[in-house]
Image: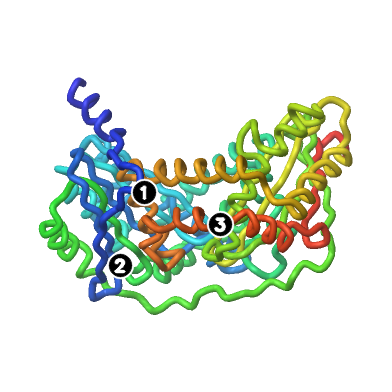
Amino acid sequence: MKKQFIISMLMCLFVAIGFGQEIDYETYELSNGLDVILHQDNSAPVVTVGVMYHVGAKDEAPGRTGFAHFFEHLLFEGTKNIERGEWFNIVSANGGSNNANTTQDRTYYYETFPSNALELGLWMESERMLHPVINQVGVDTQNEVVKEEKRTRIDNAPYGKIAYSTGVNKHLFKKHPYKNSVIGTMEDLDAAKLDEFKAFFGKYYGPNNATLVVAGDFKIGETIKLIKSYFGPIPSKPEIERVNIKEDPIQNKIEVTEYDSNIQIPLKAFVYRTPSMKDRDAYVLDMISSVLSGGKTSRLYKRMVDDDKIALQVLAFARSMEDYGTYLIAALPLGDNSLEKLAAVMDEEIEKLKTELISEREYEKLQNTFENRFVSSNSSVQGIASSLATYHMLYGDVSLINDEIEIYRSITREEIKEVANKYLQEDKRLEMDYLPENEK
């Protein structure tokens, strides 16, 4: 018990990253097209093995939504050499932890182990890539798991359709598959045949559509040999044709009403379609969201919650994706205040951003906020591994692990005003009233 406790503590141990300290890494490619990124840090006996596949919800065929997320669950079922139901037992028996997550653009699997179990992590991920068992028993089992997840996180969760964008993106995207939710529909998953799941794996789960990251306590030379041994023999698959669908510009304000049986308090939301995560403007919008609702001293919170006392809560956040992004500003009314009143005040604060420069004090606070966020994101080997894979796969630039903060540092007050004018336009947004079901 004591040994297991010590191992668990080590798994949570943060790597000491000093301010401004660079993350060292090496990159190379195997002959089968697998991209490899290595980050060696021997300060703690912990290592993360992660594999990111360039497949997400946007890659699904019409009528088969939810496939990418479904595989996040399905590929823990077992492999040719790992019996069904034993994946998590193997990981925990060796003092490790593991997880996976899916977005519109990619799927990521990872294990974090004591460093003496590095080879085990590499073997397990190569097993997942080479020959997982995809059968009807696994599909049926995970179908029920995904249904329960959807019920818990979206269908029965207050404001779940807002948090997971299922009630938002369908209005902002008419052509691009971003209009679909990551979790998909149960009707699509129920209708899918076993051969379709096998075909999805065969198309997207090849080494030439993946990035392998090893971060933490290991020796470079030995690890390169292990990677070649486990992943080198895996054959590459046909090149994938990427989604390349352009949305028409929004010409007129989109006004919709959505209902939620899980809420008692309505919500007013403005949502804007924004550029790719790789676009500089996406970074500026990230800063704008901090100005508007980044804590209790932010503009919207101070105005609507503290001063005017018309809102119970306010929020604003950018959700950046590979092809486009979305930017949401929302508020919940306090007492008898109307959604129309909230909308008017939100528009007033947006207009201030568009007509006046933010103060020097606000600007300094912004810089401190993003410096701290940058340091925090690189504070553990698990976080570093995920960042390295993301920057490589979705941004096409691994060096952002060190350089992205320079983009934020270079953003000016004038640029914040300019980008607010460019994207936060009333006639180019979705305006949503999100109401309790009993108000129908």
Q: Residues within 10 Å of mark 2 (few under 14, many from 20)?
A: many
Q: Residue furthest top?
A: 2
In the depicted view, which residue is nearer to us: 175 or 332?
332
Numbered disc in front, either 1 or 3: 3
Instruction: Give yes or no for contact between labels 2 and 3 (Cβ–Cβ under 8 Å).
Output: no
Above or below, 139 relative to 91? below
Above or below, 386 relative to 337? below
Q: Residue furthest front?
A: 360
Amino acid type assigned to the residue bearing label 2 in the image? Asp
Mark-to-mark CA distance, 2 and 1? 22 Å
* Residue on which the image places disc 1: 76
Circle 3 — which element?
loop
Numbered disc in front, either 2 or 1: 2
Query: x and y percent of residue 6 in the render?
Result: 21, 26
Circle 2 — which element?
strand
Circle 1 — which element?
loop
Please tell me which residue is depicted at 55% across the width and 73% down the height of the picture: 243
Amino acid type assigned to the residue bearing label 1 in the image? Phe
In the depicted view, which residue is nearer to us: 349 or 389?
349
Q: Quadrant of residue 304?
A: top right
Please tell me which residue is depicted at 23% across the width and 35% down the height of the picture: 95
* Residue on which the image places disc 3: 411
Q: Quadrant of residue 364?
A: top right
Mark sitting earlier along the chain (2/3): 2
Q: Residues within 10 Å of mark 1 (few under 14, many from 20)?
A: many
Residue 307 numbered tag = none
Residue 184 visible at all: no
Numbered disc in front, either 2 or 3: 3
Residue 35 numbered tag = 2
Query: x and y percent of residue 301 in the render?
Result: 70, 34
Instruction: Give yes or no for contact between labels 2 and 1 (Cβ–Cβ under 8 Å).
Output: no
Q: Residues within 10 Å of mark 3 (few under 14, many from 20)?
A: some
